[in-house]
Image (spheres, helix red, strand yellow):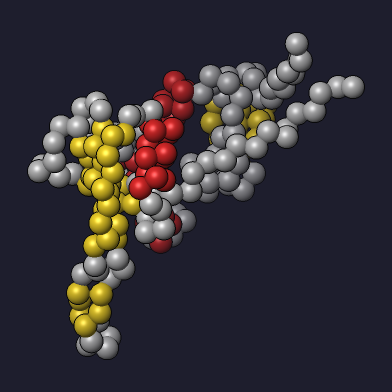
Amino acid sequence: MAPKFGNLRIYFPNIIFKIIPDARLGKNQAAFRVPLNINKLDIRDYLTHIYNVTVTDVRTAVLPGKLFVNRYTGQKERTSRTKKAIVTMKEEFAYPAEPDVENDLGGKESRFEKMRTKSRTKGWNYRPPLEMKELRQEIMAKRTQTDQSSTIKFCLECSNMLYPRVNSEHRRLMFACRNCHYEEIADNNCVFRHEVLHTP
């Protein structure tokens, strides 16, 4: 009987820990903003298994919400309560470096999308600025460096999926959009990949 695959269930945590910078803490301590429904054991288990750190002590405190005046009713209200956890670890804790928004978090793509949306409000015959064209070239150059296999590509104009198309005149593979007239030269001749996994 052939072995069955696909029955292994992997559970990912659905809680979010937010680091709170605090200069008053020690070198081996860190402060987090955690959900209200988790306790100290959950915090220790989360940090130990996800980030592989040795937790020696966990202290939590539920902070009341801040007062503010509702501009519609004029009454004083409070924001939601928050829970702060101070974790003491065996090793020294170093705050992670700030992420590179432009390269790691899709900052260029989001900036290009804002420019494209702004240009659409001025009409379809609006000529895109030079900055928009240069940003498109940077995005394409980044895709060429990172995409080494068959991946799904999306249109930079309307965000629809690109489909492979053969340019018979120049004898080259293209990726074209079926919704608009956007097309780009394929940086890889692979359009489909099927990996066959053999059991030992």
Quadrant where the C terminus is found in the figure? top right
- Is 195 on the left-hand or right-hand side of 102? right
- Quadrant of the rendered image containing residue 133: top left
Query: What residue appears at the point 47 percent right and 56 percent down from the top-left corner?
Result: 124
Quarter of the image for residue 42 reads top left
Residue shown at 39%/48% (left/top)? 16
Task: Establish if 1 lies above or below 128.
Answer: above
Q: Residue at x 28, y 34 (%)?
A: 56
Which of the image's four quarters has the N terminus?
Answer: top right
Res 125 visible: yes
In the foreground, 62 or 112? 62
Towards the viewer: 106 or 165? 106
**In this image, 133 relative to 23: left or right?**
right
| 120 lies left or right of 199 | left
Q: Nearer the viewer, residue 185 or 16?
A: 16
Q: Residue at x 61, y 24 (%)?
A: 150
Q: Relative to 62, does residue 184 appear above or below in the rendering?
A: above
Residue 74 against residue 148 in the figure, above or below? below
In percent of width and height, residue 117 lies at 41, 55
